[in-house]
């Protein structure tokens, strides 16, 4: 199968130069104005490609249809990719293309301390001879998930150029704010109108994910009593000290730094503190509901201990559900996973199934009733300045989608 890799590359390079960093402090959807820039650009592109039913919703979802090329009824397939990039680094990349990677270390020019090498980046060995794309060293590349966006566009373009390929109706959706766990919260699934879907948001060539973390957010708020420090004895209740006490009581054995595989964690992501008030933002992750509940209970116990230690302080702990392990629903009908495995094999790849220590929009979509495993699009070292992607892996992802479309046409 001949994929137009130069068109794929050109589109990807344009996408990553747009700053679509999301913001979890924003109440709007999308959470940042930059996401609208890319969403409107994508709406224009898919209209020009010739897709039908093109729509951009007030909440920032770009939807469109690729009409069926078969007359027989078939399940409606959907492909998803998110336009936002992570909150921890700037999202407007200066992309660099490294043609025919030869295995030598890649030093990123805008920050020479950022180096990709075979010793520190194991997957690079599999990419020797590939065309790699990186950022310049001070920003994210944005392959998470603009590689997925480019892959979906390339698959649609290929199918439009080859109407002889049999496939049913295909819907696409580009959404905002996946990185802040709001990606599909305001999406109307009736507008999508699909029976099965796939997100393009996994890394390793051949990867398919159908098991993710379950996730909650937690916020601890402490209100102390302020006083002039010169006359504070018996009066002041220092919220910053209480926050420090709480943080020091979190077990290191349940931290991201000390866990891997299927172990969950409690991660204090941010702390803002003064003598008068403090706020600790945390994320809780576990593969099982019971493990997530146990971590919630532990935080409740630690908050209660703080109230006992200083009854004059006001201590409030709140939880917000983010997403749940998609395995709970997919294991009831594994056809979407089995079809993905077969599509990977037809693309010449060995399927790699693993439980990912993260979540995707597919976690929420599956929970809401639309089964949505996650497929690779080639990105690595995501959420860091060293993020990179292989153009050849992206092309294999496109090929996988085209095989998937044909498999579902016969379902």
Image (cartoon, rainbow, N blue to C red):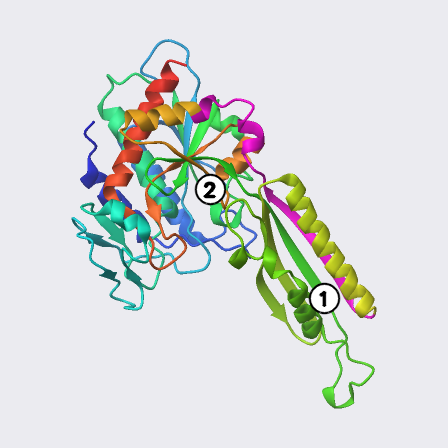
Q: Residue at x 57, y 28 (%)?
A: 329
Q: CA distance from mark 2 to mark 1?
A: 35 Å
Q: Is residue 137 magenta?
A: no
Residue at position x 50%, y 43% in the image = 359
Q: Position of residue 80 (x, y in %)?
A: 42, 35
Residue stretch rendered in magenta on the structure: 312-337
The x and y percentages for residue 406 are: 33, 19
Say whether disc 2 or disc 1 marks the residue closer to the N-terminus: 2
Q: Is residue 187 visible?
A: no
Which picture quadrant has residue 331? top right
Q: Secondary structure at mark 1?
A: strand
Above or below for 396 versus 270? above
Q: Nearer the viewer, residue 148 or 116?
A: 116
- Residue 179 seen: yes
Which residue, given by chain and number where applicable, does mark 2 sit on? 60
Q: Which quadrant would the N terminus be assigned to in this image? A: top left
In the picture provided, is 409 more to the left or to the right than 116?
A: right
Q: Label 1 belongs to which residue?
A: 222
Q: In the rendered image of this protein, does residue 96 appear above or below residue 67?
A: below
């Amino acid at each position: 199968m001949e994929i137009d890799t130069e068109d794929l590359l050109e589109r990807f390079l344009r996408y990553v130069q747009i700053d679509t960093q999301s913001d979890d402090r924003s109440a709007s959807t999308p959470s940042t104005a930059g996401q609208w820039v890319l969403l409107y650009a994508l709406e224009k592109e898919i209209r020009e490609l010739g897709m039908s039913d093109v729509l951009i919703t007030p909440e920032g979802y770009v939807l469109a249809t690729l009409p069926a090329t078969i007359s027989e009824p078939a399940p409606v397939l959907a492909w998803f990719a998110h336009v936002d990039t992570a909150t921890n680094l700037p999202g407007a990349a200066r992309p660099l293309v490294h043609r025919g990677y030869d295995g030598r270390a890649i030093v990123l020019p805008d920050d020479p301390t950022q180096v990709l090498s075979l010793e520190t980046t194991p997957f690079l060995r599999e990419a020797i001879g590939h065309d790699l794309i990186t950022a310049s060293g001070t920003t994210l590349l944005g392959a998470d998930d603009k590689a997925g966006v480019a892959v979906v566009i390339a698959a649609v373009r290929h199918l439009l150029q080859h109407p002889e390929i049999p496939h049913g109706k295909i819907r696409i959706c580009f959404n905002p704010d996946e990185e802040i766990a709001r990606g599909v919260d305001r999406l109307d699934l009736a507008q999508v109108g699909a029976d099965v879907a796939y997100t393009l948001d996994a890394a390793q060539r051949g990867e398919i994910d159908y098991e993710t973390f379950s996730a909650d957010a937690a916020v601890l708020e402490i209100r102390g009593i302020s006083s002039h420090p010169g006359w504070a004895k018996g009066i002041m209740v220092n919220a910053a000290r209480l926050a420090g006490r709480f943080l020091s009581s979190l077990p290191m054995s349940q931290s991201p730094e000390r866990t891997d595989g299927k172990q969950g964690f409690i991660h204090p992501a941010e702390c803002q503190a003064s003598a008068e008030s403090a706020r600790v933002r945390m994320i809780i992750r576990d593969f099982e509901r019971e493990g997530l509940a146990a971590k919630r209970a532990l935080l409740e116990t630690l908050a209660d201990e703080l109230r006992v230690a200083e009854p004059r302080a006001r201590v409030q702990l709140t939880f917000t559900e983010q997403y749940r392990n998609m395995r709970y629903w997919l294991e009831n009908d594994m056809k979407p996973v089995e079809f993905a495995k077969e599509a990977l094999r037809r693309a010449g790849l060995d399927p790699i199934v693993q439980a990912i220590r993260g979540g995707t929009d597919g976690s929420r979509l599956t929970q809401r009733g639309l089964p949505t495993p996650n497929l690779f699009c080639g990105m690595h070292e995501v959420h860091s300045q060293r993020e990179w992607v292989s153009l050849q892996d992206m092309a294999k992802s496109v090929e996988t989608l085209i095989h998937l479309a044909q498999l579902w046409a016969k379902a």
